[in-house]
Amino acid sequence: MPKPTIAVLGLGAMGLPMATWLVHSQFAVRGFDVSPGRAELAAAAGVAIFESARQAAGPADVVLVAVRDRAQLEDLLWGPDGIAGVLRPGAAILLTATIGIAAVQQAAERLGGAGLELVDAPVSGGPVRAGRGDLLMTVGATDAAWALAEPAMAALASTLVRIGAAPGDGQKMKTVNQLLCGVHIAAAAEALALAGRLGLDKRQVLETLMAGAAASFMLGDRGQRMLLAYAPEGAEVRSRLGIFVKDMGIVNAACRAAQLAAPVAAAAEQLYLLAQAQRKQGLDDSAVITVLAPRE
């Protein structure tokens, strides 16, 4: 069975490495990004670049959408250059972003009215893992949509889990994931900030914590970058702090809708909002430690 033709719309931090890996995996990949620089990088990797999202998406079987939020998704689908009107019946939108449960459910219903499928497949793992097909992808999709998009998803994800048969189910799982990730980063920042205030060597503290019961992936990963947060150039931006402003908002909205008290998640969201108020949203999310302890 021939591989589906893939269009990747949004060649940013995640979209570009995913597109590049799909080319590496022998898919025919069409692409578009509003940034000429990102489009040039994709072209150098073998992606066929087009002048508009509509041109890139029109003939595709699967359209991978790597947008930041609900507003960007709706503009891409139904805005002035919206792609929904040019897709062939039965084509699937593969949404890899975290935009919230209700937003995906409503978009899927509207697309369904036009004979289009939405595969709800938010990803976790970051740009480096995206560039080697090593993502976690949690999926909510109908049987037809799953069958169409599964080859591309299997190439992109080392862990591919079909959570449910409806769009929105993938967002539910990602919301749970982001609750833990957001809280873990905030807790790591508090622990290392306290270590610093107590006069301990934070690097030694981190190494010691990672050898015991307090160890976690997020502590080990973000902790190393928190050690660089006070340097003039800061840590390399691998995951923007602003992502957790958005995602913890989604988490706490889901908790309220489910009538679930989540005081730890709510407190973590406030920390990210404080960081945003200090204009740190464009920094690596490890910079949240500087909100708690402005000076090393």
Image (spheres, rainbow, N blue to C red):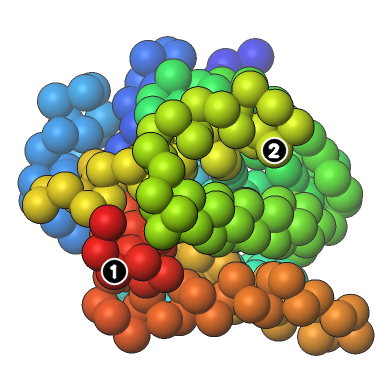
**Image-based side of 1 in relation to 223, left or right:** right
Q: Mark 1 points at which residue?
A: 294
For the N terminus, the quadrant is top right
**Image-based side of 213 in relation to 14, left or right:** right
Q: In which quarter of the image is residue 261?
A: bottom right
How many neighbours does mark 2 have within 10 angstroms: few (below 14), some (14-19), or many (20 or more)? few
Which numbered marker is on residue 283?
Answer: none
Please, what is the three-letter code of the amino acid marked with disc 1? Pro
Is residue 256 visible in the rendered image? The answer is yes
**Image-based side of 94 in relation to 75, left or right:** right
How many neighbours does mark 1 have within 10 angstroms: few (below 14), some (14-19), or many (20 or more)? few
- Furthest residue toward front: 199
Which numbered marker is on residue 214?
Answer: 2
Return the x and y of residue 228 as percentages of the image width and height.
26, 43
Q: Residue at horizontal 60%, vertical 71%?
A: 268
Q: What is the tally of numbered marks visible in this picture?
A: 2
Please, what is the three-letter code of the amino acid marked with disc 2? Ala
Q: Residue at horizontal 50%, vertical 26%?
A: 207
Name the one closer to the observer, 232 or 150.
232
Tag 2 secondary structure: loop
Name the one closer to the observer, 65 or 255.
255
Tag 1 secondary structure: loop
Q: Residue at horizontal 39%, vertical 49%?
A: 199
Return the x and y of residue 175 as percentages of the image width and height.
71, 61
Return the x and y of residue 257 as percentages of the image width and height.
83, 85
Could you tell which of marks 1 and 2 lies nearer the N-terminus? Answer: 2
For the C terminus, the quadrant is bottom left
